[in-house]
Image: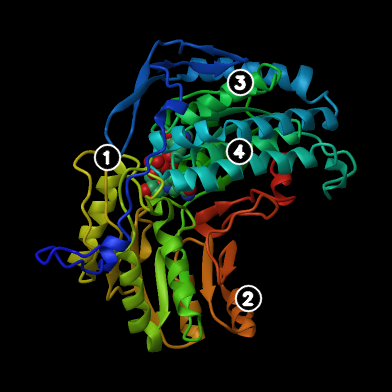
Amino acid sequence: MTQPEDAPVPTRPGPAEVFAYAPAPESRAVVDLRSSYGLFVDGRFVDAVGGGSFKTVNPATEEVLAEVAEGTAEDVDLAVAAARRAQTRVWSRMPGRERAKYLFRIARILQERSRELAVLESLDNGKPIRESRDVDVPLAAQWFFYYAGWADKLEHAGFGAAPQPLGVAGQVIPWNFPLLMLSWKVAPALACGNTVVLKPAETTPLTALLFAEICRQADLPPGVVNIVTGAGETGRAVVAHPDVDKVAFTGSTEVGRQIARTVAGTRKRVTLELGGKAANIVFDDAPVDQAVEGVVNGIFFNQGHVCCAGSRLLVQESVAEDVLARLKRRMGTLRVGDPLDKNTDVGAINSATQLARIRELSEVGEAEGAERWSPSCTLPAHGYWFPPTVFTGVSQAHRIAREEIFGPVLSVLTFRTPAEAVEKANNTPYGLSAGIWSDKGSRILWVVDRLRAGVVWANTFNQFDPTSPFGGYQESGYGREGGRHGLEAYLR
Ligand code: NAD
């Protein structure tokens, strides 16, 4: 068939059209959201004694998702008492092989309900569904599988012939990986025969409450897991409770310091997983495109709300221009928007407070003379959003090079020699993680030996595995989570 003469001449689509994705939103219908939630104490959902509550919102829309009970010191008291009863009468007396069955069961239910958990996590936290679906939830299940395997082998873990549980663990977790941080805390504690009182972050309580339902589904004995929702005051009550034997905290260095002061002089054992300001070091012999992917993953994964985020890019001067050009080109392809859309790369900032902090530090970066750049992107009209941002011309004295921004903001510094890279990477009060990009094994080993960081990734970044320990030095905290080392924090 011939075309009429006045038909428009078809043009080749430009790159933007080739890569324009149609919306692909995940369905919200898989989540059965209730309008209000109670605390989970002694195997039951109960109202807070004081009757208080707070709202949790969807950060992508500012819509209120649910009203959640606000636990007070009295509620914490009830939860700790329930945990103590369960620990002494049931859980610590149960053989490890029986405890393992519960952990395996929880792991299986996490997998079975993974879609529901992923959607709920993205709704409450703002993270892209691709990440909650492919990272948070599968890793949470893996943590339970892994520690289920340890529950009947504790005498072979290297902590003595008959290691004993500590008792009741008070656990306070942040909002950046709500379900995953819960798993990091709850799985090893339970495997070792402890019971827990866990306080999720006030902006992301919903997956912890769904986890409570999963504990019931798994027939976990009442009182083994207790979940008390609330804000800082509730967390303080958990940490300060005299009948808590062990405190495990992940969050800011400032609150970590307060906790260290609270427990000082008591018999309580403590692990603190705090902030970071990781260096991602790119050498001149690095596979550049692979390194750029790693840099993007290091800082824009989970909107940069990651304690081990590669928030300082240290790039060797001779390749800096090329790396930056490719980085900016790659940043231009990141899709920012609806967290429930399966094409989204960068979701919403978790809260108005966090957005204000990111904005403030970015303004300080400009005021101190660094050059700010973001790709052009249209941010949604409602909700809390911040575009992927890179600062060049950053000096080590700048606040954006020293302080944890906890957002999608990268500070770029350059170096000439490996020794200078090490010196700059270590020039931080933190020491949680670092990344190295180089083709030479010997160079990688030389640098790794000299970096003061708990985890160093080589030619990759943000890899998490339940079998390997994770934790920091200096102001990044103390204690290790994950692997055999993670058991030590819960055994006498
Ligand atoms: P935060 O430390 O204030 O909160 C973390 C958890 O601790 C929450 O559950 C909170 O309710 C609780 N909490 C607050 N005050 C407490 C107290 N006095 N005693 C006991 N528990 C208490 O963190 P945030 O306010 O959500 O974020 C502030 C900054 O912390 C961020 O900008 C970021 O730099 C950092 N942060 C780090 C991590 C991490 O994984 N290392 C996680 C979240 C936030």
Quadrant for the C terminus, please.
top right
Q: Is residue 158 left or right of residue 415?
A: right
Q: Is residue 356 visible?
A: yes
Question: Which residue, given by chain and number where applicable, does mark 4 sit on?
Answer: 183
**Residue, disc 2:** 449
Residue 261 placement (x, y as % from top left): 51, 41
Q: Secondary structure at mark 3?
A: helix
- The answer for how far apart the CA atoms under marks 3 and 2 are is 43 Å
Image depth: mark 3 or mark 1 in front: 1
Question: Which sits earlier in the primary sequence, circle 4 or circle 2?
Answer: 4
114 to the left or right of 33? right
Q: Residue at 30% across / 39% down in the picture?
A: 60
Q: CA distance from mark 3 to mark 1?
A: 32 Å
The kind of secondary structure element at disc 2 is: helix
Q: Quadrant of the N terminus?
A: bottom left
Three-letter code for the amino acid on which mark 2 is drawn = Asp
Residue 150 percent location from the top left of the image: 79, 42
Classify 479 as above or below 492: below
Label 3: how many Cα within 10 Å (few below 14, some 14–19, many 20+):
many
Question: Marks 4 and 2: which is nearer the front?
Answer: 4
